[in-house]
Amino acid sequence: FSGDAFIYYDDEDLIPYSLLGTASTYVVNNLDIPAIFLKKRRDSLVCEGRCSHNFNMMDAFNFCKQSLLQYGGHAKAAGFSMLPENYNNFIELFNAYVKQQNESSKHVINLKVDAVIDQIKLGDLSWHELEILLPFGQENPEPVMVIQDTTLNQIKEDFATDLCGHDIPADVTCNIAIQWKNTNQVKVLDFNL
């Protein structure tokens, strides 16, 4: 999949309403883009949306509010209902909001760094020590660590690496901002040479 957002309309009724949020979360975790799942429920369409650190789902739905009956949630997880005849207008507005956000944040990375470490220290850290910080969510985001003076190749020696679309030279020394996803995987959030 390529694109700035993932929109799925379950017109075949494959996903139970109670799992729309779970499906959205799965897409966000794998593609790192905003995801919304919609389906018909009674006489309206319902939606659950999820996003990661660089997007605000409530702001997006507020931007689209003229198409919606009601909406609610918080920055990273929100939902709405709307009349089926407003679907096309909603899609246009949502895509316009996504495009506007991508253009305004294209070169602005606003990460709150929790720790600056050497890669050797990352290996010394116990994944189980980080687990005491669970559960992660809006008020308790996943820790962001910057590995100093490393290369992508060095990180790949120890971890499966989700680059999130970043084009990092494999053998150039740089600082790399990551989230440690599990004992053998990191997610690259940003880097500087």
Image (spheres, rainbow, N blue to C red):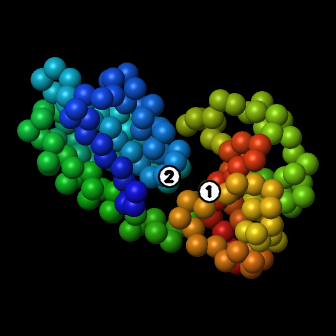
Q: Is residue 149 above or below residue 80?
A: below
Q: Identity of the amino acid at label 2?
A: Asp
Location of the N terminus (image quadrant): bottom left
Indicate the secondary structure of the residue bearing disc 2.
loop
The mark tally for this picture is 2
Find the residue positioned furthest to the left. 85
Q: Residue at x 19, y 54 (%)?
A: 92
The answer to whether residue 39 is left or right of residue 177 is: left
Residue 45 seen in the current view: yes
Residue type at mark 1 is Asp
Disc 1 and disc 2 in contact, CB within 8 angstroms: yes
Q: Position of residue 193 (x, y in %)?
A: 70, 78
Q: Position of residue 19 (x, y in %)?
A: 40, 26
Question: Which quadrant of the view contains residue 58?
Answer: top left
Q: Percent from the top left, x then y, of residue 27?
A: 45, 44
- Separation of disc 1 and disc 2 at Cα? 10 Å
Q: Earlier in the sequence, mark 1 or mark 2?
A: 2
The quarter holding residue 132 reads: top right
The kind of secondary structure element at disc 1 is strand
Above or below, 54 against 100 in this view is: above
Camera-side mark, 1 or 2? 1
Q: Which residue is mark 1?
A: 162
Pick the residue in front: 24 or 157.
157
* Residue bearing mark 2: 32
